[in-house]
Amino acid sequence: MTITLITASFLGLLFFYLSYGVVKNRFRAKVSIGSGGDEGLENAIRAHANFAEYVPLVLVLFGLLETQGVNEYLLIAMAAFFTVGRYMHGLTFGKFEGRNPFRFWGIIFTWVVLLVASITGLVLGFNLL
């Protein structure tokens, strides 16, 4: 499961960075639980939580698809788009006034990969090819 391992490793580095951002903002705002109404801390918490909401399921899907022998180029493409999307979303969360194009495309990449991986899993699982 080399593709899943490499993807999880890149995403693990981002998760570490997002976790550090929450801790740094907690110290700055002097808040140990919740956000205390601090916008910077709230953004850090949401960026971290959004990552934690999507990444585990997609990594499980990648691992299962990889063990089922899905085309490695398809899996590499999905992993690359997903990883880039998560970086775009996580690193720019709360950094723009108004619309954030990186966050927008980051979630689009995430949703497309989640959808393609899920459908691919169903096709393989039900042996439809």
Image (cartoon, rainbow, N blue to C red):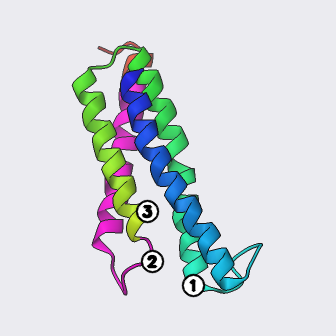
Query: x, y (%) of residue 78?
Result: 30, 37
Question: Distance from label 3 to label 2 (Cα)?
Answer: 9 Å
| Residue reaching furthest to the left | 73
Q: Which residue is at the front of the view, 56 or 116?
A: 56
Q: Is residue 89 left or right of residue 81?
A: right
Q: Which residue is mark 3?
A: 90
Question: Distance from label 1 to label 3 (Cα)?
Answer: 16 Å
Q: Which mark is residue 94?
A: 2
Q: Which residue is mark 1?
A: 39
Question: Distance from label 1 to label 2 (Cα)?
Answer: 9 Å
Q: Quadrant of residue 2?
A: top left
Q: Which residue is at the front of the view, 5 or 55?
A: 5
Residue at screen point 57% across, 52% down: 52
Vertically, is 21 above or below 60? below
Residue at screen point 37% across, 87% down: 97
Q: Is residue 112 visible?
A: no
Q: Quadrant of residue 39?
A: bottom right
Q: Earlier in the sequence, mark 1 or mark 2?
A: 1
The main secondary structure of the magenta stretch is helix
Quadrant in the picture for the N terminus: top left
Q: Which mark is residue 58?
A: none
- Total marks shown come to 3
Residue at screen point 38% across, 70% down: 92
Residue flagged by tag 1: what amino acid is it?
Glu
Vertically, is 13 above or below 105? above
Q: Which residue is at the front of the view, 38 or 113?
A: 38
Query: x, y (%) of residue 95?
Result: 40, 79
Residue flagged by tag 2: what amino acid is it?
Gly
Question: Magenta span covers which residues?
Answer: 93-121
